[in-house]
Image (spheres, rainbow, N blue to C red):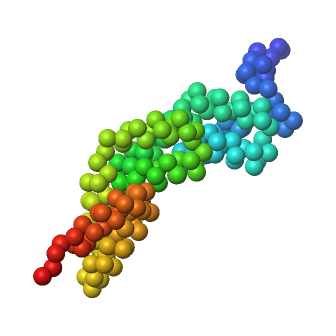
Amino acid sequence: MPDTARSTTAAERGATTGAAGTDPVAETFAFVLRSTQARPQTEAEIRGRLRSREVDEAVADAALVKAKAVGAIDDAAFARVWVDDRGDKRGYGVTRLREELRRRLVPEPLISDALGRIADRDDLAVATELAAQRAQRMSGSLGPEAVARRLQGFLVRRGYGAALAQRVAISVSGLDRRWD
């Protein structure tokens, strides 16, 4: 009795099989998808992870092309979301945002485009609001000088320039008022 069940060949599945009988591009693509589902990552970060796993460069390139095609990797979108979250919602300054995106290996033109989203933001108002919130959580036993020092350090770590941070810290701590 002839076998009527049709078997599919590797060519029909559109896959090339590796030594273990699996498609290395498909395996790498699946790894990339799992990695980016856990947390968003840049193309350079994924490339680094693939290099550390000793994935062949051609296989990595093919898997990354597939990942980009399905939107799993998009450095421009990553940078925009990063700036929206940390710049708008958390109030980070441009300096810190730029450093963080560079550390995540986002290309410089994409960083500039993403930071353009907050270019017209009033940094003085944002820094003042952050400092006021922070000052409310400080001990009441601290003097205005100590509050100002701590607020300035806080704002500089958040990515604001030293001059702006000092100006805001002096204002929020009350050092700019005359005491008689």
Q: Outermost residue, right direction?
A: 19
Residue placed most toward the observer, 35 or 1: 35
Q: Is residue 171 left or right of residue 163?
A: left
From the viewer's perspective, is 6 left or right of 72? right
For the C terminus, the quadrant is bottom left
Residue 109 in the image, given as x and y percentages of width and height = 53, 35
136 relative to 130, above or below: below
- Establish if 133 lies above or below 106: below
Q: Residue at x 32, y 41 (%)?
A: 120
In the image, residue 8 sits, relative to residue 106, either above or below, namely above
Please tell me which residue lies in front, 72 or 157.
157
User: Farthest residue toward the bottom?
Assistant: 141
Q: Residue at x 18, y 72 (%)?
A: 177
The residue lying at 79 percent from left, 45 percent from top is: 54
Quick one: quadrant of the N terminus? Answer: top right
Residue in the picture at 24% in, 66% down: 171
Q: Position of residue 78 (x, y in %)?
A: 50, 40
Residue 5 visible in the current orientation? no
> Residue 168: x percent and y percent?
29, 63
Q: Residue furthest left?
A: 180
Above or below, 136 relative to 141: above
- Residue 72, by quadrant, is top right
**Residue 8 placement (x, y as % from top left):** 76, 20
